[in-house]
Image (cartoon, rainbow, N blue to C red):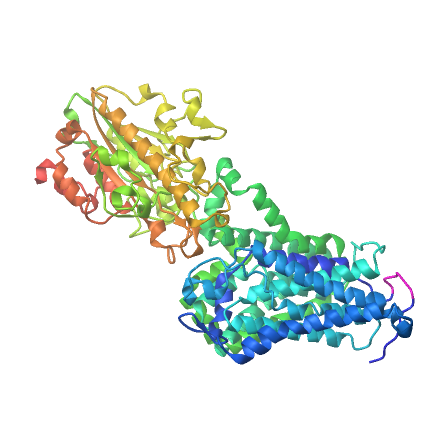
């Protein structure tokens, strides 16, 4: 190597140091890994090192333990000490020739020391466990403070040698870059083989050590040089390659995470992942390069990134799968619900994810290129993508068939596809068009000849899952007040969907889930107009995001915040306002039959702790963060259970009120629209596609309470109903069961779907 002492200069003209690329981008990548940790990817690459029990390939192995673990750290120590010695010797006259290298030696010593100190200082602050401490690898589950990877830093800190020899204008300085990368990864993989670290830990260390060495280099040798924000123009080819790389390997981490969970570590599966990556990369590049104009390339690159960033955020925080159903939910979200999801933390992380692309858009110009060149480059990208697909078409198609949800994890394609289907293909619940009349002449049965009035309340629960329902055998008694009121609890009810947008129209439709046809459900009238046409007074009261078209043609009662000021704050009211906040004179009509449908706020997430007054915070501590994965599972479940406890109180209060109405025969039916995931399999909230939806999102509570007068008027047998409630039920039974319970004669009634049919007097 040709050692040459540099001239004294503070100019970037010799080697243009890019602060953005050299310091800030590695720090951004470090923060990305720290915030967005995809365990299936780590587990996939840990698989070849794990044997069984708590045994790893490198456990007790001399090479891994003595050579790599104990011996590896001395390489960095030796370099740092040698640099320090040279630095000190440079002050002696005998070694005056070392004086020009004094600053470089000090830089190397301090950079390596800073890497060691910062890495060791960060580890105690991290709750990230080591692989060997996880239960899935035979560990106890205790926090291991294992992030980032300390041992790999012994190699990566030698990035300082690369910067040092670049400063000395050494021709072969790149060799030290290769050396640092090689040693860092050898030491990192060595610790992975012992179960001490995951792959992401080593990546984080690599980016952090690089940033530290680069920052020290900047401060040592170019302290006064201005920070260059605006960069020199780059070619359209480079711009599209960078954006395609970002979309593939950053914003499609959810895709690769799911793919890794479906595969096992092997050469063929590694090749399959690589093929998928090349296909995605080629597809993104081809689309962007076809735009061919610098303005269009920038606009669409930013647009793709913004959409992909939003999808990535919600997938990571809540396990959200972006499809047409989820996009319908998003488009139908009211301002109060949106405010709970689009928090300051959301905008902060969303902006963080978009930062590199924003920088490219506004500070990196694109050189003009010819139209023909752009088309040619796009075609090359397309051909490469097709070639990779053909190389392993069977593997890719098999993976997609076995894990169809992968289609909904390709960002931002999932956003575009889901939005298109939600807007143009799937029907909207808010379309203001006449509904098809399904029965023009329903009639009231003989039970209604009684002069005494009837009031029946149907409470549509929100996001209550059976797994946390006390009456269903949950370990906590979350329904003590309902238990004391001798209600009829159904053992298990299967919801029509996993979101309000699907379940609510479906559960009050004659179509149901068995013959699910969204277009038909939204074109036909619901149960409510049928009841109204038969002569029943029907009302809808909403404390949620609307009735999703179910109450079309039926009068709604508004909650008056002045009638229940203690129950309302801002845009939200607690569920007790469904009764306390309405004008009850509208529903108390002597001698008439009235049915009131109440739509709860219930357990709608993620802000479970905001669904109940403070005096219902029985289970503690609770999660108060809308980013549920920032809370422990105990805190999430506690907040959710408190909301169930409040629903129990609300329903018990409605029952007590109904009991006190002497001039009416009364009854109540409660059923939740869908369930909820509370972190099982890293999934939160609801709205999962039916194909992969866990039981926690589909199994919901349902109960019935009837006054003695109601049972006698409608000829219903309490013992029989309790026996029927032991069988599995579903939302499909609501339509005909409510017609049966209320004795409404209709051509659309199906006795086979009426759980009360065998319990009426005529059948006893």
Q: Quadrant of the C terminus?
A: top left
Residue 589, quarter of picture: top left
Classify 128 as above or below 481: below
In the image, taking residue 151 as reference, residue 661 lies left or right, namely left
In this view of the protein, which residue sits in the foreground, 514 or 461? 461
- Magenta extent: 8-13
For image coordinates 41% across by 44% down, the residue present is 501
Could you tell me if residue 113 is visible in this image?
A: yes
In this view of the protein, which residue sits in the foreground, 727 or 751? 727
Residue 651 x, y percent position in the rendering: 30, 32
In the image, taking residue 324 as reference, residue 117 lies left or right, namely right
Residue 306 x, y percent position in the rendering: 61, 52
In the image, taking residue 386 as reference, residue 707 lies left or right, namely left
In this view of the protein, which residue sits in the foreground, 394 or 95? 95
**Residue 705 on the magenta segment:** no
Classified by dominant secondary structure, the portion drawn in magenta counts as: loop
For image coordinates 84% across by 65% down, the residue present is 103
Residue 409 x, y percent position in the rendering: 50, 59
Residue 298 x, y percent position in the rendering: 69, 56
Residue 359, quarter of picture: bottom right
């Amino acid at each position: 190597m040709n050692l040459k002492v540099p001239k004294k200069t503070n100019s970037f003209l010799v080697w243009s140091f890019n602060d953005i690329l050299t310091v800030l981008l590695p720090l951004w990548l470090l923060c990305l890994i720290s915030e967005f940790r995809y365990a299936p990817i780590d587990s996939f690459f840990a698989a070849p090192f794990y044997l069984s029990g708590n045994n790893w390939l490198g456990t007790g192995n001399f090479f891994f333990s003595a050579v790599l673990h104990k011996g590896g750290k001395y390489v960095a120590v030796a370099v740092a000490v040698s640099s320090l010695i040279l630095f000190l010797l440079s002050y002696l006259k005998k070694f005056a020739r070392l004086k020009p290298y004094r600053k470089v030696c000090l830089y190397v010593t301090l950079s390596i020391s800073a890497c060691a100190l910062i890495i060791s200082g960060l580890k105690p602050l991290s709750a990230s466990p080591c692989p060997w401490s996880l239960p899935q690898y035979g560990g106890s589950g205790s926090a291991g403070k294992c992030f980032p990877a300390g041992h790999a830093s012994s190699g990566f800190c030698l990035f300082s040698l690369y910067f040092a020899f670049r400063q000395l204008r050494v021709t072969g300085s790149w060799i030290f870059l290769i050396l640092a990368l090689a040693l860092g990864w050898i030491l990192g993989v060595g610790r992975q083989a012992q179960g001490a670290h995951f792959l992401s830990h080593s990546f984080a260390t690599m980016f952090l050590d690089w940033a530290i060495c680069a920052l020290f280099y900047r401060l040592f040798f170019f302290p006064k040089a201005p920070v260059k924000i605006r960069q020199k123009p780059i070619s359209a080819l480079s711009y599209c390659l960078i954006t395609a790389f970002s979309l593939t390997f950053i914003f499609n981490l959810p895709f690769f995470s799911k793919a890794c969970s479906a595969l096992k570590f092997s050469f063929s599966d590694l090749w399959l992942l690589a093929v998928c990556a090349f296909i995605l990369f080629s597809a993104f590049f081809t689309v962007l390069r076809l735009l061919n104009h610098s303005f269009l390339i920038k606009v669409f690159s930013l647009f793709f990134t913004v959409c992909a960033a939003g999808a990535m955020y919600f997938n990571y925080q809540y396990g959200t799968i972006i499809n047409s159903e989820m996009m319908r939910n998003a488009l139908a979200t009211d301002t109060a619900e949106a405010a709970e999801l689009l928090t300051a933390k959301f905008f902060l992380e969303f902006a963080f994810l978009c930062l590199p692309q924003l920088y490219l858009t506004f500070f990196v110009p694109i050189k003009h290129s010819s139209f023909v060149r752009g088309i040619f480059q796009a075609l090359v990208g397309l051909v490469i993508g097709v070639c990779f697909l053909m190389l392993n078409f069977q593997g890719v198609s098999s993976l997609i068939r076995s894990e169809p949800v992968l289609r909904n994890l390709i960002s931002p394609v999932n956003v575009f596809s889901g939005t298109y289907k939600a807007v143009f293909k799937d029907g909207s619940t808010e379309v203001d068009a006449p509904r098809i009349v399904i029965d023009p002449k329903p009639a009231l049965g003989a039970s209604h000849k009684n002069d005494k009035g009837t009031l029946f309340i149907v409470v549509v629960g929100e996001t209550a899952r059976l797994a946390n329902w006390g009456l269903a055998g949950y370990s906590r008694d979350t329904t003590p007040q309902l238990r004391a009121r001798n209600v009829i609890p159904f053992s298990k009810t299967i919801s029509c969907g996993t979101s309000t947008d699907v379940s609510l129209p479906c559960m009050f439709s004659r179509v149901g889930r068995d013959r699910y046809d969204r277009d038909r459900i939204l074109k036909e009238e619901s149960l409510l107009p049928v009841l109204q046409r038969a002569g029943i007074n029907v009302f809808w009261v909403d404390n949620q995001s609307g009735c999703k078209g179910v109450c079309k043609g039926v009068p709604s009662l508004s909650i008056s915040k002045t009638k229940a000021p203690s129950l309302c704050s801002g845009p939200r009211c607690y569920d007790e306002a469904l009764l306390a906040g309405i004008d009850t004179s509208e529903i108390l009509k002597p001698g008439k039959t009235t049915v009131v449908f109440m739509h709860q706020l219930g357990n709608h997430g993620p802000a479970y702790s905001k669904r109940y007054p403070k005096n219902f915070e029985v289970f503690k501590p609770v999660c108060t963060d809308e980013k549920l994965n920032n809370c422990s599972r105990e805190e999430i479940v506690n907040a959710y259970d408190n909301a169930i406890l409040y629903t129990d109180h609300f329903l018990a209060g409605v029952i007590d009120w109904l009991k006190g109405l002497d001039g009416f025969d009364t009854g109540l039916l409660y059923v939740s629209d869908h369930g909820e995931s509370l972190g099982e399999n890293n999934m939160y909230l609801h709205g999962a596609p039916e194909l992969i939806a866990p039981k926690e999102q589909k199994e919901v509570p349902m109960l019935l309470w009837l006054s003695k007068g109601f049972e006698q008027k409608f000829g219903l047998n309490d013992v029989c109903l309790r026996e029927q409630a032991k069988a599995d039920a579903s939302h499909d039974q609501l339509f005909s069961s409510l017609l049966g319970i209320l004795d409404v004669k209709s051509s659309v009634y199906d006795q086979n779907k009426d759980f009360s049919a065998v319990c009426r007097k005529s059948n006893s």
